[in-house]
Amino acid sequence: MKNARITTEKHVSLLKDKNLYVIFGVTLSAVMGVASIAPALPKMGRVLEVSNQQIGLLITMFTLPGIFLTPVFGVLADRIGRKAVLIPSLFLFGISGTACAYATDFSWLLILRFLQGIGGASLGALNITLIGDLYSGNQRATAMGYNSSVLSIGTAAYPAIGGALATLGWFFPFYLSLLAIPTGLFVLMVLQNPEPSNGTTLTEYLKNVAGSIQSTKVIGLFTANFLTFVMLYGGYLTFFPILMDERFGKSSFVIGIILSGSSFVTALTSSQLGKLTARFSEPNLILTAAVIYISVFLIIPFTGNIWMLLIPIALFGVAQGINIPSVLTLLTHQAPTEHRAAFLSVNWTVIRGGQALGPVLLGTIYGFWDITGTFLFTAGLALLFVVISLLMIK
């Protein structure tokens, strides 16, 4: 009873920390760029006269800058400070994202999405970096779980909000990007984080970063994240809305509500990560998630009743809730403060690679096959995830 009371007090203290809420704001900005427009993709395609194979470029162009720039921003965050990178990133994200609402054609929209992607390139790495800087031990795992819950709530709320806004006009979801600007102001005025102290030369620093990412386990975790986000951004966020549109003829708003379902389950699941990791190891949780992914993507294409889709949607939410925060917790343990931002930026680059490749890869499969084949291919990626979990992580 005494240990339980101490644990509860720590969790209450954690939830009183203003820094954690600033991190939540950064996390909500990081996930906004895709989740808020995903339900509107079919409508955008029709209004802008773009095919289903091409519309995924709105996601790819947003995620592409992160592949190249996130490591650069990670190095800068370690060398000159977290805030010096985070604040201008949030402002650029908010301004260019809002400008997307005023794009006159698809080409301009892609350019503005690329600029917004530059602003968003550092957000997903630095929010996790800040958790690693500010917390340790089980408190870090708990904070990671809370942050993943917030991410999932955002992933749940943004599709519903974006889908509702899209009923007013295809461009309305882009106005949500304005929220990143007050978040940047909160980072400036409220966040109190320990900035890293780097007395090493740049060459030695880069050598230390390179050495920390070469272990089999770290490479396995990077690969797991890559596959996770190929499946999420390709199979789920891009082609699940298309399946809902093609097979059931549902509106953007209804698609957004359905997408929200799995994210609420993810939020509930990840909020219990501290308890789960006290009973099960992170590698076992990751392997369990990989097996669930296979089931989800095998069930979806053969479900003819829209209500029955709630089963794979809920299962997907559970898998996300135990997989993503478990991978991030394991990775954060591997990185010392002096180069944590760069280390986690490599992970974010891997994630961005999965996000960018997912819609394009599965769009190609969709073009050669059909919507059923697209999901079967995604199930094959989940099977590869199981193999990686067994051989490199567990």
Image: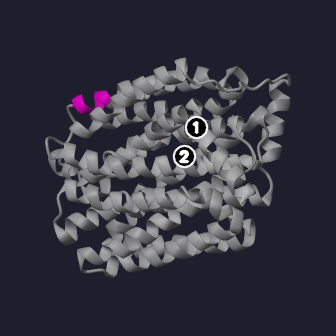
Q: Position of residue 251 (x, y in %)?
A: 17, 58
Residue visible at 40% across and 46% down? 154
Q: Nearer the viewer, mark 1 or mark 2?
A: 2
What secondary structure predominates along the stretch shown in magenta? helix
Above or below, 309 against 113 in this view is below
Q: Residues within 10 Å of mark 2 (few under 14, many from 20)?
A: many
Number of other residues with Cα within 10 Å of mark 1, as a class: few under 14, some 14 to 19, many 20 or more: many
User: What residue appears at the point 47 percent right and 63 percent down from the top-left corner?
Assistant: 231
Residue at image point 86% right, 25% down:
200
CA–CA distance in space, label 1 to label 2: 9 Å
Q: Which residue is mark 1?
A: 127
**In the image, residue 102 lies in the stretch drawn in magenta:** yes
Q: Tell me, yes or no, whether the highlighted magenta stretch contains residue 184.
A: no
Q: Quadrant of residue 249?
A: bottom left
Residue 162: percent from the left, percent from the top? 27, 45
In magenta, the rendered stretch is 98-103
Q: Earlier in the sequence, mark 1 or mark 2?
A: 1
Label of residue 147 in the image = 2
Q: Quadrant of the N terminus?
A: bottom right
Q: Write the residue at 85% across / 22% down.
A: 199
Residue 352 in the image: state x and y as whole percent.
Answer: 53, 47
What kind of residue is marked 2?
A: Asn
Q: Quadrant of the C terminus?
A: bottom right
